[in-house]
Image (tube, rainbow, N blue to C red):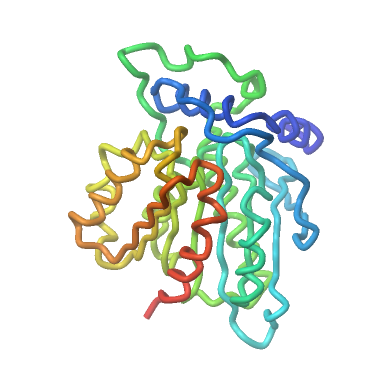
Amino acid sequence: MKLTTLMRVGMAFCLPVAIVTMAFAQDAGKQAPAPATKGPINRSPDPRVQQKMYHFQDTNEDLPYALYVSSKVSKDKKSPLIVALHGLGGDQNSLMRGNAIDLAEEGGYILVGPIGYNPRGWYGTPVGQPRNGGAAGKAKANPAAANDPPNLRELSEKDVINVLDIIRKDFNIDDRRTYLMGHSMGGAGTLYLGTKYASNWAAIGAIAPAAFAMQSNAVPMLTPVKDTMPVIITQGDADTAVPVENTRRWRDALEELKMNFKYVEMPGEDHGSIISKGMPAIFAFFSEHSKH
């Protein structure tokens, strides 16, 4: 898929969240919930954010990523880095706006948003099982997914790691203060890549994680990092795309393992509003945790 095709695909995903929640149901084998918010998922990029490209050798195409560099960053000192993973149907800019940029500027962070190969790559997370024994993919088909490669999730995971490597080469990154966060699909990706590549991260933050496929395996998945991986999860109790009951199961797993974690549940916040409302708690949590 060439760059122009990728851009058309991204534009095609400027859809209401109602369609995104339907895609959750298709992927995770769950009944589609009601829309969480109104309006488009994607908006114009924040003018403070750089739009970058790199060549993805696995598929011989150029992939985008978004980059913000605090004015406090300099070559002569190590800087903290946050990798931000967007939700289903979003793009590399989805978490790269608003108070996330303000907080990154204040804290002296480099903030980077990979595309994850395309808007529905799922960052390598496992495929969910269909509900009630139905066949996978029987929910309303997503036309934009028709040409997705069969190894889409593998490519999505690889894109994130590639972008991490690029930023480490281009900047003087503090490996003791490198973090991963993500929303919804990106929240699931954060839990998955956070544990799979645990040595990369000082802490991780999942925002309303759509981690349905991994939920039943939460304790075994987290056990290898129970003593080393600080985790923060933010969730709105009015979320209809990722119901609060689902996320509380991750909280329960973190409690069972006695992990170093913080769970922030906000009354009245939904699947979209929890992003900005919970962002200060995530940055505060990250600032309190570095590798020793």
Looking at the image, which is closer to me, 215 or 17?
Answer: 17
Q: Which residue lies furthest to the bottom in this view?
A: 76
Side of 286 relative to 152 (left or right): left
215 up-or-down from 221: above or below:
above
Tell me what residue is drawn at x 48 percent, y 28 percent.
24
Tell me what residue is drawn at x 77 percent, y 36 percent.
7
Tell me what residue is drawn at x 41 percent, y 20 percent.
31
Q: Where is the N terminus found, in terms of image quarters?
A: top right
Numbered marks: total = 0
Q: Where is the C terminus found, in terms of image quarters?
A: bottom left
24 up-or-down from 287: above or below:
above
Q: Whole-percent x and y of residue 178? A: 50, 69
57 up-or-down from 202: above or below:
above
Q: Whole-percent x and y of residue 133? A: 31, 13
Which quadrant of the view contains residue 188?
A: top left
Side of 132 relative to 102 (left or right): left
Looking at the image, which is closer to me, 70 or 243?
Answer: 243
Tell me what residue is drawn at x 63 percent, y 62 percent.
99
Which quadrant of the view contains residue 237?
A: top left
Q: Whole-percent x and y of residue 121? A: 56, 37
